[in-house]
């Protein structure tokens, strides 16, 4: 018994889809992470508490081990944020790490001026982030990010 001519292309298409589904697996991609300042709070002693947001753009979880980022505000060097968060961040997700910084005098003045004038403050982060992808060895990523912060309404000494 011969199969009708219309059935053969459908069978071939079905076999092709089965073969394609069998070959397709989840691709594991490691992408450089990103960092940004989510919140900067000026403390009574003049130090800053910084909520640093770490973004994992990889297709797998990454364990963030070490962060060392030089901070510049309104083109004034502020100091270096150092942290050992030891946190895992899922694929295409983000989390925050709290760290403190004793800023340089000109950076401290720039932040005070932005808060007093209720204006935006530009910042730059430059440095290294060490992270370990799932089932892989630790890697170091170079970061160079720019952003802006604005005074948070109703929160004294806070920029977001």
Image (tube, rainbow, N blue to C red):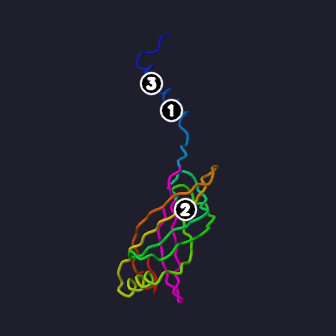
The residue indicated by pointer 3 is 10
Q: Point out the stretch of residues depicted in magenta.
A: 30-55
52 to the left or right of 115: right
Picture quadrant of residue 138:
bottom right
Residue 44's x, y, as percent?
53, 89
Query: Residue 16: image x %, image y %?
Result: 48, 27
| Image x and y of residue 65, in percent | 62, 62
Label 1's element? helix
N-term mark: 3 or 2: 3
Callouts 3 and 2 close, C-beta under 8 Å: no
Closer to the camera, 20 or 68? 68
Question: Measured along the vertical axis of the image, is residue 51 above or below residue 116?
Answer: above
The residue at which mark 1 appears reads as: 20
Is mark 1 in CB contact (under 8 Å) with mark 2?
no
Instruction: Please tell me which residue is depicted at 40% across the width and 85% down the height of the picture.
Output: 115
Nearer-N-terminus badge (1/2): 1
Q: Residues within 10 Å of mark 3 (few under 14, many from 20)?
A: few
Q: Select label 1 or label 3 by which is in front.
A: 1
Which residue carries the number 2 mark?
Answer: 129
Q: Secondary structure at mark 2?
A: strand
Q: Is residue 116 above or below residue 137?
A: below
- Residue at 36 percent of width and 77 percent of height: 120
Q: Left of 152 or right of it: where is 101?
A: right
Q: Residues within 10 Å of mark 2 (few under 14, many from 20)?
A: many
Quick one: 119 or 6, which is closer to the camera? 119
Viewer-nearest of discs 1 and 2: 2
């Amino acid at each position: 018994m011969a199969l009708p001519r219309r059935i053969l292309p459908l069978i071939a298409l079905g076999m092709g889809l089965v073969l394609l589904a069998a070959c397709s697996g989840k691709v594991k991609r490691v992408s450089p992470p990103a960092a940004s300042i989510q919140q900067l709070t000026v403390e009574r002693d003049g130090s800053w508490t910084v909520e640093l947001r770490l973004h994992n753009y990889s297709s797998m979880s990454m364990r963030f081990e070490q962060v060392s980022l030089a901070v510049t505000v309104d083109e004034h060097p502020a100091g270096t944020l150092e942290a050992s968060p030891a946190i895992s961040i899922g694929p295409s997700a983000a989390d925050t790490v709290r760290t403190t910084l004793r800023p340089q005098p000109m950076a401290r003045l720039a932040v005070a001026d932005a808060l007093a004038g209720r204006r935006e403050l530009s910042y730059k982060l430059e440095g290294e982030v060490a992270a370990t992808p799932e089932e892989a060895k630790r890697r170091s990523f170079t970061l160079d990010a720019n952003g802006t912060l604005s005074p948070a309404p109703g929160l004294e000494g806070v920029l977001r």
